[in-house]
């Protein structure tokens, strides 16, 4: 934010040609300032930033960084490393095949943002700058110096477009803005890293394991953040850090490696996820973990329908509800009219099959519609499900679902004598109720991931994508459009039902209110679709990341309160404006590309 | 089907030379009161390249859509190898008629190879279960499909770009890919809708070669085209469609020499004395038209 104001961005200045920075300092000075400032910021995190432990995270201790200081420390270390790499020291350049300068800019910016956020927030929270200890002044100054340093780093300025003097002032304003934006983008432009050198397979495997370990640590840290400030700092550092690593070319390298070993990547990702409950000492965050998993699994199921087959389904949460209600009815709950208690495999299967049957029943008449019409009709069916369930309470209709009270006190699962409601101690780690369900849900997620992967890479998956791309051409290629779409719809419903059958047990109670179109708590149809779009349509990791973010952000940022849906809507609008392809675009095929075709694909990031 | 084993070159869908592949009889297509195609007969025999030409709006594409199951003819019937065409376009493709589109309709975000694999859809059977369970049959079928698709890409000269996204191909290669995709469904008849639209002369010639090669595989071809040189070089027979009716049908020389065809494309000359008198007449007509259009707003104001 601050960079834009400091930048001397008059397009009339003779800026073409030779690379130069925003600030007229020599590049060597800038580099030294950036690296030195970051190093000083690292040191300052070991100082006290404030005098009282009233500020969350206890930033008063010398020699032991806490709370937000840890985040600044991480950002500072990354900046120092990138700064040294930009000097080309000790072959560090080989570690970062992309552009170390651009990466350094983002890393320093992230560190600066976190440090200043902290300092400003301490002053605001405790009432005045008087509450700051010397450490805070040091970190503020150090990160500011580093920021000034990176602003002096040279880059190739874009050729300014000539202004048409006859344009209206509004047009000229837009032109200037476009120009400035191009300059900002050019300042962090990175060359795409060359093809990765051939390394022995075990190195690749080590890289994957390391990446998964880092992923687990980041996720565990994020889920374990205890107060708003820490979570905001976490988001800033993760966002800028990821950007910096992308500019440094590491993200491209890692995705090339994971693309080479897809099965191994999947397995290690699931091992890392399964290790999550073991990192927790109590059940507090495993609860969040299991809800995220349910949300993510259902979003991935929706991704088959929306991302692969291109069918905009706004009532998808109804299938989760069908699965949950079916499973709850046969769970042995006292409020279920069917007084039976089926084993888990039977109730899960039953939930999946009943949801699939509903999928076919709803899909058969509606899938003859295209595009927006389909979206509206599915939205309607989603609400019909909820209202029907609400009315089947014995007064307005047959007594099946217990109306708005829902089916409550659903007993815990018991698989082969393993009671999910009890605490179990495995290898010295205590797994409580939600941790148990987390592991079970992870198994369901694994099933959905495998189904997604296998179906997308097959004749039927290609038919889905063909239908999504161009329905008329797909029909002319002999694809029975209706049948193929119905399969996608039914498969999506079936997977949602499967997730629902676990969800019913996790939440103890199923009520109609859980399955609305839009609601404050995910999963609901709007959030599911948002998770798919936010993460990236047609990918596996996209909806998982999208769901994790969409669950964590409202859960962690309590101060958003009633403005949560507003903020959510704004965020979606901004995302669609600036990154329509989602956080993790479908790059599977682009990776297989040659250098010359990849370059524009990366730079333009055309969503289409 | 018995012919499959006789020659290795021929495509599996190919028929005995001389056999009637496509037989359209009295095809009429009405949209409300508008008759777009009236009582058109057309036959295509195996191993033949037939052209369909006509001025804009003559009903060529409508007729084409009747052949591909996109429209169901109001009257008349279309038979493919003796059997009446089913009324759904995907069933028509399964029966053995493949087509390309006037404005290229590739699956832009799929790779070149995947585009051709989609074309194989009707000739493979693996459903969802086999995709999920991944038995040996699945891998065998998938490998066979890929091999066949690569052969076709080799045939049109795109084998080197199999992993590119279709949208990144240059225009001429997109046309070729569309043809390869259509061939992947192993058709007995290939319908090409303006295959050289927007091509330069070299590309047009290359397309010509390609169509001849397809004919040599034993696949009958029906082409709609505006490029007369292309059509007359290529086709064994040409049918001319004007205002929904077939005007002439015959070999290139017959059609080129036919006065009515020239008239349909260039307009008919005035019967008696073209020249000064005609120009004067046109000018007079135009002047009158001007006054009429001028009068219109005035009329409205009166009301």
Image: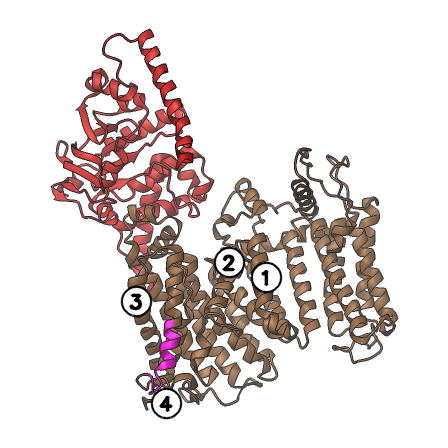
Of the image marks 2 and 3, the number of the one nearer the N terminus: 3
**Residue nearest the observer in this picture, B277 or B191:** B277
Q: Nearer the viewer, mark 4 or mark 1?
A: 1
Q: Quadrant of the C terminus of chain B?
A: top left
Q: Position of residue A441 (x, y in %)?
A: 46, 76
Marks 4 and 1: CB-CB under 8 Å?
no
Crowd class of label 2 (few under 14; some 14 to 19; many from 20; radius 10 Å) = many
Magenta: main secondary structure: helix
> What secondary structure is marked by label 3?
helix
Q: Are marks 4 and 1 on the same chain?
A: yes
Q: Which residues are magenta?
A: A384-396
The residue pinned by badge 4 equals A332
Of the image marks 1 and 3, the number of the one nearer the N terminus: 3
Residue A102 appears in view: yes
**Chain in brown on the image:** A
The color chain B is rendered in: red
């Amino acid at each position: 934010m601050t960079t834009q104001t400091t930048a001397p961005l008059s397009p009339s200045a003779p800026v073409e040609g030779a690379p130069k920075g925003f600030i007229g300092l020599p590049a060597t000075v800038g580099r030294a300032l950036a690296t030195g400032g970051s190093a000083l910021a690292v040191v300052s995190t070991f100082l006290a930033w404030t005098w009282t432990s009233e500020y969350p995270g206890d930033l008063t201790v010398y020699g032991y960084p806490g709370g937000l200081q840890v985040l600044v420390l991480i950002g500072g270390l990354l900046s120092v490393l990138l700064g040294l790499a930009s000097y080309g020291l000790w072959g560090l350049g080989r570690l970062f095949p992309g552009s170390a300068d651009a990466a350094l800019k983002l890393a320093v910016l992230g560190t600066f943002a976190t440090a200043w956020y902290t300092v400003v927030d301490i002053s605001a929270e405790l009432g005045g700058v008087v509450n700051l200890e010397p450490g805070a002044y040091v970190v503020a100054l150090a990160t500011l110096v580093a920021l000034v340093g990176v602003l002096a780093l040279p880059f190739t300025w874009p050729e300014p477009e000539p202004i048409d003097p006859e344009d209206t002032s509004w047009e000229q304003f837009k032109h200037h803005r476009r120009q400035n934006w191009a300059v900002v983008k050019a300042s962090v432009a990175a060359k795409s890293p060359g093809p990765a050198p051939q390394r022995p397979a075990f190195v690749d495997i080590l890289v994957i394991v390391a990446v998964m370990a880092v992923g687990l640590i980041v996720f565990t840290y994020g889920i374990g953040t205890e107060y708003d400030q820490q979570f905001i700092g976490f988001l800033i550092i993760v966002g800028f850090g990821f950007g910096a690593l992308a500019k440094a070319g590491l993200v491209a390298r890692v995705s090339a490696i994971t693309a080479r070993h897809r099965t191994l990547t999947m397995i290690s990702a699931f091992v890392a996820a399964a290790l999550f409950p073991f990192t927790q000492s109590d059940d507090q965050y495993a609860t969040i973990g299991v809800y995220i998993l349910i949300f993510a699994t259902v979003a991935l199921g929706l991704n088959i329908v929306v991302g692969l087959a291109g069918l905009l389904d706004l009532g998808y949460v109804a299938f989760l509800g069908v699965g949950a209600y079916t499973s709850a009815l046969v769970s042995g709950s006292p409020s279920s009219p069917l007084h039976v208690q089926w084993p888990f495999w039977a109730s899960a299967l039953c939930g999946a099959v009943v949801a699939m049957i509903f999928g076919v029943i709803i899909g058969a008449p509606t899938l003859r519609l295209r595009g927006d019409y389909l979206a509206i009709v599915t939205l309607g069916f989603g609400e019909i499900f909820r209202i029907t369930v609400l009315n089947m309470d014995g007064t307005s209709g047959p007594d099946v679902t217990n109306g708005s009270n829902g089916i409550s006190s659903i007993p815990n699962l018991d698989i082969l004598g393993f009671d999910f409601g009890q605490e179990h101690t495995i290898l010295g780690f205590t797994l409580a109720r939600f941790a148990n369900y987390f592991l079970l849900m992870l198994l369901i997620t694994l099933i959905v991931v495998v189904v997604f992967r296998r179906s997308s890479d097959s004749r039927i998956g290609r038919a889905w994508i063909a239908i999504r791309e161009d329905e008329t051409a797909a029909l002319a290629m002999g694809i029975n459009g209706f049948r193929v779409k119905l399969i996608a719809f039914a498969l999506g419903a079936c997977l949602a039902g499967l997730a629902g059958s676990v969800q019913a047990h996790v939440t103890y109670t199923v009520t109609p209110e859980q399955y609305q179109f839009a609601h404050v708590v995910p999963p609901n149809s709007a959030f599911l679709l948002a998770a798919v779009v936010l993460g990236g349509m047609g990918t596996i990791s996209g909806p998982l990341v999208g769901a994790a973010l969409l669950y964590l952000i409202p859960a962690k940022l309590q101060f958003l309160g009633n403005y949560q849906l507003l903020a959510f809507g704004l965020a979606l609008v901004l995302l669609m404006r600036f990154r329509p392809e989602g956080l993790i675009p479908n790059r599977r095929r682009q990776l297989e590309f040659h250098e010359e075709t990849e370059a524009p694909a990366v730079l333009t990031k055309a969503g289409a | 089907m018995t012919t499959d084993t006789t020659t290795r070159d021929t495509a599996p869908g190919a028929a005995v030379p001389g056999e009637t592949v496509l037989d359209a009889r009295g095809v009429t297509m009405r949209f409300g009161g508008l008759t777009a195609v009236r009582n058109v007969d057309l036959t295509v025999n195996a191993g033949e390249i037939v052209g369909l030409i006509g001025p804009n709006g003559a009903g060529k594409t409508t007729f084409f859509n009747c052949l591909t199951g996109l429209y169901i003819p109001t009257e008349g019937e279309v038979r493919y190898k003796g059997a009446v065409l089913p009324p759904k376009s995907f069933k028509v493709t399964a029966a053995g008629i493949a087509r390309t589109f006037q404005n290229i309709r590739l699956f832009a975000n799929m790779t070149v190879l995947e585009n051709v694999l989609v074309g194989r859809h009707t000739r493979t059977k693996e459903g969802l279960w086999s995709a999920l369970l991944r038995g040996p049959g699945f891998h065998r079928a998938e490998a066979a499909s890929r091999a066949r698709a690569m052969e076709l890409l080799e045939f049109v000269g795109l084998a080197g770009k199999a992993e590119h996204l279709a949208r990144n191909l240059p225009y001429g290669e997109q046309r070729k890919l569309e043809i390869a995709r259509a061939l992947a469904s192993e058709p007995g008849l290939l319908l090409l809708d303006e295959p050289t639209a927007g091509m330069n002369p070299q590309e047009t010639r290359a397309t010509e070669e390609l169509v001849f090669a397809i004919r040599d595989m034993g696949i009958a071809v029906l082409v709609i085209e505006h490029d007369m040189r292309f059509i007359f070089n290529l086709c064994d027979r040409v049918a001319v469609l004007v205002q929904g009716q077939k005007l002439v049908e015959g070999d290139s020389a017959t059609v080129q020499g036919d006065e009515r065809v020239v008239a349909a494309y260039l307009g008919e000359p005035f019967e008696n004395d073209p020249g000064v008198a005609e120009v004067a007449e046109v000018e007079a007509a135009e002047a009158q038209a001007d006054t009429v259009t001028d009068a219109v707003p005035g009329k409205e104001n009166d009301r």
